[in-house]
Amino acid sequence: MKKILNINKKIKSFNKNIFVEGDKSLSIRWVLISSLSKKKSVAYNLLKSEDVMSSINCIKSLGSKVKFKNNKCEIIGNGFNIKKKGIISINAGNSGTLGRIILGLLINSKNKIKLIGDKSLSKRDFSRVIKPLKKFGAKFNTKKNLPLIMRGIKNPKPIKYFETRGSAQCKTSIMFAALKSKGTTEIKARKSRNHTELLFKHLKIPIRIKKNKNFDIIKIKGIKKINPLNYKVPGDISSCAFFLVLTILSDNSQLLIQNVNINPSRIGIISILKKMGAFIKLKNSKIYKGEKIADIFVKSSKNLKSINCPKEWNSSAIDEFLIIFLVAAKSKGISYFKNIGELNQKESPRLIWASKILNLIGVKNIMTKSSLKIYGNPNLVLNKKIIIKNFLKDHRIFMMSTIAALTLGGNWKISDADSINTSFPKFLKILRELNR
Ligand code: S3P
């Protein structure tokens, strides 16, 4: 379906309280971890998006039982072993997280596993998980891309591995494989989101973590069975990000976004926007099963200034750069983002797309393979026609373009509105409520 969104008016001022949908990283992890327990796990507010539904369909193909009605999802897993015979085909759809993590979980599968995905996922790099999983003893028919076939190993050997990219997907894939190995796996991992570590701790899985400045040393002992996991999924900061920027760049507006996961490894966007002069305050902070949660209050912010973004913040803002670039476009001065080549490894080549969109809206920028300089213009107002299409249905390109249209003006035609179903199906519904 090619649903085109037309926007030719800025959003009206608003003052509201909203919730965004459940966190995608936590939702996918919950589904996969629950599939390992033979007892019933229950989650509330699980994100009902295509990536999470793909996760559910994958674990069903592997033998788990799932009931997902309204706000409640129940999973009864099949333990550590798959009872099916023959080759099992699983489809990760658009989700890099699912595709990469589930391979770790299947390290000891007796069955050959065929992993497929959509057009975008089939272009993405799987060598980053193939390499460590081969060390455990798995065999693959390919070096890099989907479709792939993995042949697991009955008794995976624990490994020592240096994860150099700061990829939480890669780290988590290894952590899952470690659970099924006899002995201790040691991962030296560049900093990245740590949801899996927190869930493992909560589940009392033997895990030890030593934190250094740039990387963590994670030691995990294999186990034979795992407890069920009941969970209430907090809101996704990556979805919240679009509303933070919408509010900051709108006139006379304010918003309270309630119950958002503010795990320190995810809130680079808050540090970056605050440094650029945005008004953001955290309220009612609490800890839930190891994760930090808060309400986020944000107001229209004038006099935004450019940023020379510290590269140490990159991993905690990795999914938010597109929308951060929009703030840079409206700020005074030249913003500089470096070591962000990973953006081209996402659902679309996002760094290239960011530069394209900035060109379309008349904002000077200089892009290299791994950096972007944005020459901000606080007086940026548009009154021309802008067409955004053929972006590999990347949900975040769609949402960033929508926020640009609602805050900068102009006459926009943005393709593939259904791309939001990947991570944030209620995105347009919430926007309409704000604009009433
Ligand atoms: C994710 C990790 C990040 C992020 C992705 C979700 C996760 O990817 O971009 O949207 O849930 O582990 P990398 O681990 O590849 O950086």
Image (cartoon, rainbow, N blue to C red):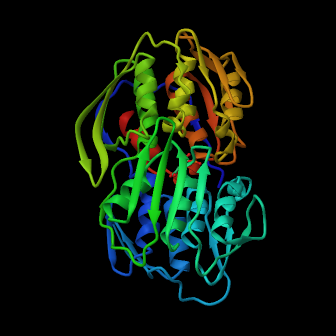
Task: Return the x and y of residue 137 as percentages of the image width and height.
Answer: 66, 72
* Residue 72 % position (x, y): 32, 67
Query: In terms of image quadrants, where is residue 251?
Result: top left
> Looking at the figure, which quarter contains the C terminus?
top left
Up-down: is 306 above or below 45? above
Residue at horizontal 69%, vertical 24%?
A: 360
Q: Residue at x 72, y 43 (%)?
A: 390
Quarter holding residue 119: bottom right
The answer to which of 404 and 374 lies nearer the viewer is 374
Tell me, yes or no, if residue 243 can be seen here: yes
Vertical arrangement, residue 308 with respect to residue 319, above or below? above
Q: Quadrant of residue 152?
A: bottom right
Disc tally is 0
Q: Is residue 34 above or below residue 300?
A: below
Asked if residue 436 shows in the view, the reply is no
Counting from the top left corner in percent of width and height, residue 11 is at: 44, 27
Residue placed furthest toward the right: 142
The answer to whether residue 7 is left or right of residue 275 is: right
For the N terminus, the image quarter is bottom right
- The percent position of residue 109, horizontal first and vertical second, equals 59, 80
Q: Nearer the viewer, residue 429 or 177?
A: 177
Residue 163 lies left or right of residue 369; in this view the side is left
Could you tell whether 42 is left or right of 195 in the image? left
